Image (tube, rainbow, N blue to C red):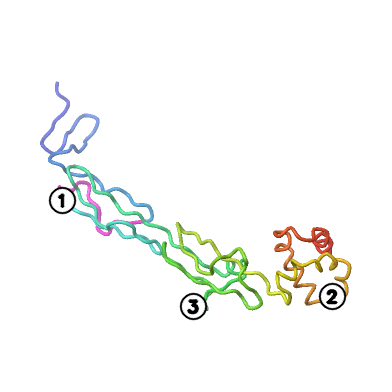
């Protein structure tokens, strides 16, 4: 006994009902992470039928928003790339603020550029090439700013620094704080390890 009953579009058996490929039809469109199909999806699509995708909020589409049923297969679907978030906490950590906006939180589309400025009393870190940075895969490589000191790095690089740990107690409080804020920079330069140890202990 034949337990299967078929026509040109479907087969029915005791166990299941399933769709077969007849003339290049396609099944449900492929899912797109962080994206949605604009139309109500169907179970079956005829050749040359299309569906349209849209990305969710704060995601940027890469590729065509339309996919087409071709010979039983869907064309390449788009991808939705996550946006970057600039917030007040991250900016404070790097001593920066937005150059063209007073807001403390913005969303930046993938591939776009945002420009920062150093906070008042801070300047661009020597290892930071630019205060402009690109959004890439939802992340920023934030620029860094360091406190402005009344003495330049050339001063810290001079021999007089080797004597500072003997006299720092007589230095005015604003200079003390200035040097304190430069400890990490001094350590990066490998200068006056003894002085840094004394300052860290305070």
Characterize the magenta stretch by its predominant secondary structure. loop
Cβ atoms at labels 1 and 3 below 8 Å apart: no
Q: Is residue 181 left or right of residue 171?
A: left
Front position among marks 2 and 3: 2
The stretch drawn in magenta includes residue 48: yes
Instruction: Tell me the crowding category of disc 3: few under 14, some 14 to 19, or many 20 or more residues within 10 angstroms, Cα based.
Output: few
Give whichever of discs 2 and 3 has the lower sequence position. 3
Q: Is residue 47 left or right of residue 110?
A: left
Q: CA distance from mark 1 to mark 2?
A: 80 Å
Q: Nearer the viewer, residue 160 or 130?
A: 160
Q: Position of residue 148 (x, y in %)?
A: 68, 74
| Depth check, front residue: 39 or 175 | 175
Reading the chain from its start, which is encountered first: label 1 or label 3? 1
Q: Mark 2 or mark 1, which is nearer the start of the sequence?
A: 1
Residue highlighted by disc 3? 100
Q: Residue at x 30, y 56 (%)?
A: 63
Which of pointers 1 and 2 indicates the residue nearer the eye? 2
Label 2: which residue? 171
Q: What is the CA distance from the residue labelled 1 to the residue labelled 3?
A: 47 Å
Label pair 1/2, CB-CB below 8 angstroms: no
Helix, strand or loop status at disc 2: loop
- Mark 2 neighbour density, 10 Å: few (under 14) some (14–19) many (20 or more): few
Q: Quadrant of residue 129?
A: bottom right
The stretch of residues the image draws in magenta is: 35-49
Q: Residue at x 59, y 67 (%)?
A: 89
Q: Quadrant of residue 181?
A: bottom right
Q: Which mark is residue 48?
A: 1
Work out whether 7 lies above or below 111: above
């Amino acid at each position: 006994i034949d337990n299967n009953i078929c026509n040109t579009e479907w087969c029915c058996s005791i166990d299941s009902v399933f769709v077969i490929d007849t003339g290049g039809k396609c099944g449900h469109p492929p899912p797109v992470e962080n994206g949605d199909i604009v139309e109500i999806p169907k179970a079956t699509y005829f050749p040359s039928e299309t569906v349209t995708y849209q990305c969710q909020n704060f995601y940027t589409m890469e590729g065509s928003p339309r996919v087409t049923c071709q010979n039983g297969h869907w064309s390449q679907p788009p991808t939705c790339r996550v946006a970057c978030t600039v917030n007040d906490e991250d900016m404070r950590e790097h001593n920066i603020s937005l150059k063209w906006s007073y807001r403390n939180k913005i969303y930046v589309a993938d591939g776009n550029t945002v420009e920062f400025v150093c906070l008042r009393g801070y300047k661009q870190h020597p290892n930071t090439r630019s205060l402009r940075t690109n959004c890439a895969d939802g992340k920023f490589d934030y620029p860094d700013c360091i406190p402005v000191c009344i003495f330049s790095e050339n001063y810290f690089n001079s021999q007089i620094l080797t004597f500072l740990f003997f006299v720092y107690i007589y230095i005015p409080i604003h200079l003390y704080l200035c040097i304190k804020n430069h400890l990490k920079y001094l350590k990066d330069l490998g200068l006056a390890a003894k002085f840094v140890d004394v300052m860290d202990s305070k």
